[in-house]
Amino acid sequence: MAEIGRMTQARRAPRWLSGVVLLRAAIVLVVLLIWQGLAVSGWFYRDVMPALPKIWDALVKLLSGVNFYWNLGVTVEEVVIGLAIGGLLGVVAGLVVGSNAFIAKAYEPYLYYLGPTPKIIFFPVMIMWFGVDSGSKIAMGAVSCFFPIALCVAAGMHQIDSVLIKVGMSFRANPWQMATKIYLPAMRHPVINGLRLGLGVALIGTLLAETKLSNRGIGFLVIQAYNNFDMPRLYAVLVTLFVLAIGVNALVARFSGLDAIKQK
Amino acid sequence: MSAAAITARRFTPPVVGFGSAIFVLAAVEFLIRIGLINRFIVPLPSEVAASFGRVIVEEDILHRFLQTAWECSAAGVLLAVFGVVIGAVMHRLPLFRRACETWVAAFASAPLVLAYPLFLVLFGRSALTIIMLAFLSGLPPVILKTLEGLGATRRVLINVGRSLKLTQAQQFRKILFPSALPTIFVGIRLGLIFALINVVGVEFLINFGGLGQLINDLAERYDLPGVYAAITFVILVSVLFFVTTERAERWLRSVG
């Protein structure tokens, strides 16, 4: 009976009025009020914590100008090319390492242990190899995303049902056919997961490189606002960037079916 | 299978892997010497190997290593304390958990390190900026893994605690926390890896601190063999850190 009562109550309460939504709204409100209180308190140097209307104005100005979208386009282009290069190399490396136990034992530890190293330290080398323009930023994106993609693909290869591989071999499939007909379809989810992880780190690698040495891109906008001590604009760029990054990550997870897998 | 065959089977792949790395370095050395690769862009591997001693002695690498290790440790302590406490509070308050868990997961996918100019303004060009960024970047996995570990405590253990009439604090200290510890440690390990990546990265970007600053310094002086040697050193430190925490995690799981 109690269960039925709860269900009836749940049906009656509109979704937007649920406890979770109300609590979230309350948390956001409290944080904004604390922020505004601190901004007008005078405890911080001027503009270190700008008042909310100032940040809002900067956000509107940023999003209504052409400059932001042009720089966003530059960053997106660099990330996409970096992801394409690093992703392709990562998938190939993962397929090669994952397809043979001997190769896996010989080379997988290098992928595994180099994966968590900070990639930004390679930036001086990338500048020497690819110049100060977009080439070095694309290379940073490619290097950053190579490792998670290669590791995910290799791990996916290890998990493939051996029956599928035997079927492919019994049909005398060549390596290309094995890769396109057996391996890649069987490990769609690890590959997509790797690409999703790779997208995140490629974005970070590219943006950090832009903050270090560039005259265009979103990373450049961040460091330009800092250099001009334009704090409302700095907050506006960071908020926009975080919303975009979180949104893209959520979209990739949803459209790739990873959310459904997690729920299972 | 004989013992010799088993030994050969065990050691041949790592030897082949290491041999391949040596072969690649030898090939690069050869290509530079015959002029196919510009030595002003890629230094001779032999020069890089020779510069190790110079970088270690002249650049005071021990002091820099200790500086980076200290920043990592400070961030590690902060993220372990705050991560576990926030995770435990969220576990205790289900409504709060349902409201905030997705935010924590979203926070994990935000490129927080990009906010380093903001942290420079807030905390100055100091170790505090590096520690705070590393701490915040490593926090989400600790919170999420603490929640996962506490939530996965076996029902029978909780019932045993209830039958012994343990208080909420005792239940947490004696049952929930020990049971969740291996999973919590996985989160702390992930958090520490994020912290190390961010510490070295931000040191490099703001040209302050230990090993990250060393790479930036050497690059600005156009000391190419030194840059490559310093990068190799940072990679070795990262690998050592990764292996040590991985072993600790395995040990904790076997004990648990």
Image (cartoon, coloured by chain):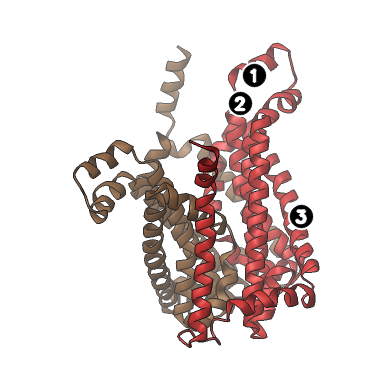
Chain colours: A brown, B red
Residue type marked 3: Ala
- Residue at the spot of label 2: B153
Co-location on one chain, circles 3 and 1? yes
Asked if residue A47 shows in the view, the reply is: no
Quadrant including the C terminus of chain B: top right
**Between discs 3 and 1, the one toward the N terminus:** 3
Residue in the image at 72% along x and 65% along y: B129
- Which amino acid, by three-letter code, is at mark 1? Leu
Measure the C-alpha gap from mark 1 to mark 2: 7 Å
Residue tagged 3: B74
**Secondary structure beneath label 2:** loop
At mark 1, the secondary structure is: helix
Report the residue marked by disc 1: B157
Percent across and percent down for residue A155 are: 43, 46
Q: Is residue A139 above or below residue A195?
A: below
Q: Callout 2: residue from which chain?
A: B
Q: Distance between the Cα atoms at labels 3 and 1? A: 34 Å
| Disc 3 secondary structure class | helix
Residue that appears at 58% across and 30% down: B151
Q: Disc 1, disc 2: CB below 8 Å?
A: yes
- Name the side, left or right, on which B7 lies relative to B136: left
